[in-house]
Image (cartoon, rainbow, N blue to C red):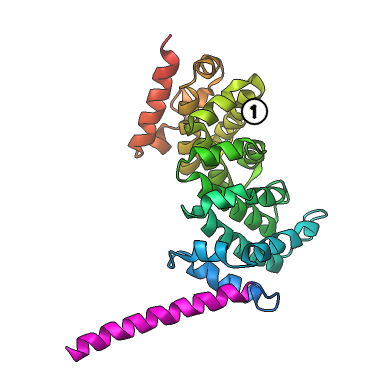
């Protein structure tokens, strides 16, 4: 009996010690001298400690410190002087913001403070060096975490910002990973009724999205990626739910989606094949 109690006691002691370490690391974020190491350590713990997001948000000075880290690299964007060390450091700050964006309690507060807007200068960069690519990808991850839970409040906020054109440019020119996260964000916006209506409301918006999707199809002929193709097909399928967009897609859906160009890459993906078949049926019905 004592052995059992002792075992439980040591587990509780360990849990308390771990929590104390978390508190200390959060406190360390507020000091410029200890911040870098604290961000690194906390970014490693964000998957394992479920209350980290509320603690980060409600701890005095922490969000301000993370935003200071983000703002401090703005001068390195133009002209492009961002180093790998600086990129890694700010990406650890972004990882903690992603933790806040992912949590149900802190997500509305994160939006209410308009914090995603601080990331847009990073998404607006086009430099293809590794530090910039990593910065864009990590910033996209924060927005991706926001849209993951199909929340209309999130979509409403994003539609009031320039996120769609930023994602569209990355979908055309980014690395495969960045393209995948960017098109995932656009797909999530489209899946929301408000997002679909917004994109199909004007010809210009629909044309901007349609052109980029078409260009991606062309790129995928040479650089086949089932992960990207899956999202492209699902975006087209969702657009076909809108009457005006469906009419336009009858004329402008890329031929490689109508013929057998992607038959080989899709042969083992039954779900995506079904999505493509449904899209073609939607467009054939008058």
Query: Which of the image's four quarters has the N terminus?
Result: bottom left
Is 7 left or right of 237, judged from the image as shown?
A: left
Residue lying farthest to the left in this orientation = 1
- In the rendered image, residue 178 lying in the magenta stretch gets the answer no
- Classify mark 1: residues with Cα within 10 Å, few (<14), some (14-19) or many (20+): some
Judged from the image, the secondary structure of the residue bearing numbered disc 1 is helix
Q: Report whether 197 appears left or right of 4.
A: right
Left or right: residue 191 compared with residue 219: left
Q: Can you say whether 173 is above or below 68 in the image?
A: above
| Residue 149, above or below 35 | above
Residue 31 place in picture, x, y as percent: 68, 75
Quadrant of the rendered image containing residue 19: bottom left
Residue linked to disc 1 = 208
Range covered by the magenta-colored residues: 1-29
Residue at (50% x, 25% y) in the render: 239
Image coordinates for residue 247, horizontal then vertical, percent: 52, 14
Q: Position of residue 21 (x, y in %)?
A: 50, 79
Pick the front one: 101 or 167: 101
Residue at (64% x, 36% y) in the render: 160
Which of the 4 image quadrants contains residue 269? top left
Q: Who is closer to the viewer here, 187 or 117?
A: 117
């Amino acid at each position: 009996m004592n052995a059992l109690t002792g075992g439980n006691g040591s587990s509780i002691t360990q849990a308390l010690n771990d929590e104390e370490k978390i508190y200390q690391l959060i406190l360390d974020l507020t000091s410029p001298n200890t911040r870098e190491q604290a961000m690194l350590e906390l970014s490693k713990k964000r998957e394992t400690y479920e209350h980290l997001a509320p603690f980060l948000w409600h701890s005095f000075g922490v969000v301000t410190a993370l935003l200071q880290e983000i703002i401090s690299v703005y001068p390195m964007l133009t002209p492009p002087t961002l180093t790998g060390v600086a990129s890694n450091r700010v990406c650890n700050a972004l990882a903690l913001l992603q933790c806040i964006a992912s949590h149900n309690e802190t997500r509305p507060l994160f939006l209410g403070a308009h914090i995603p807007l601080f990331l847009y200068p990073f998404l607006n960069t086009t430099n293809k060096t590794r530090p910039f690519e990593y910065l864009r990808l990590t910033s996209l991850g924060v927005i991706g975490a926001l849209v993951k839970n199909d929340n209309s409040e999130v979509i409403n906020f994003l539609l009031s910002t320039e996120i769609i054109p930023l994602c569209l440019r990355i979908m055309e020119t980014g690395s495969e990973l960045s393209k995948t996260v960017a098109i995932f964000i656009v797909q999530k916006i489209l899946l929301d009724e408000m997002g679909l209506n917004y994109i199909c409301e004007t010809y210009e918006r629909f044309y901007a999205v349609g052109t980029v999707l078409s260009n991606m199809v062309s790129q995928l002929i040479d650089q086949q990626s089932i992960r990207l193709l899956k999202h492209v097909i699902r975006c087209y399928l969702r657009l076909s739910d809108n009457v005006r967009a469906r009419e336009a897609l009858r004329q402008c859906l890329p031929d490689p989606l109508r013929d057998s160009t992607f038959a080989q890459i899709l042969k083992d993906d039954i779900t995506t094949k079904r999505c493509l078949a449904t899209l073609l049926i939607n467009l054939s019905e008058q």
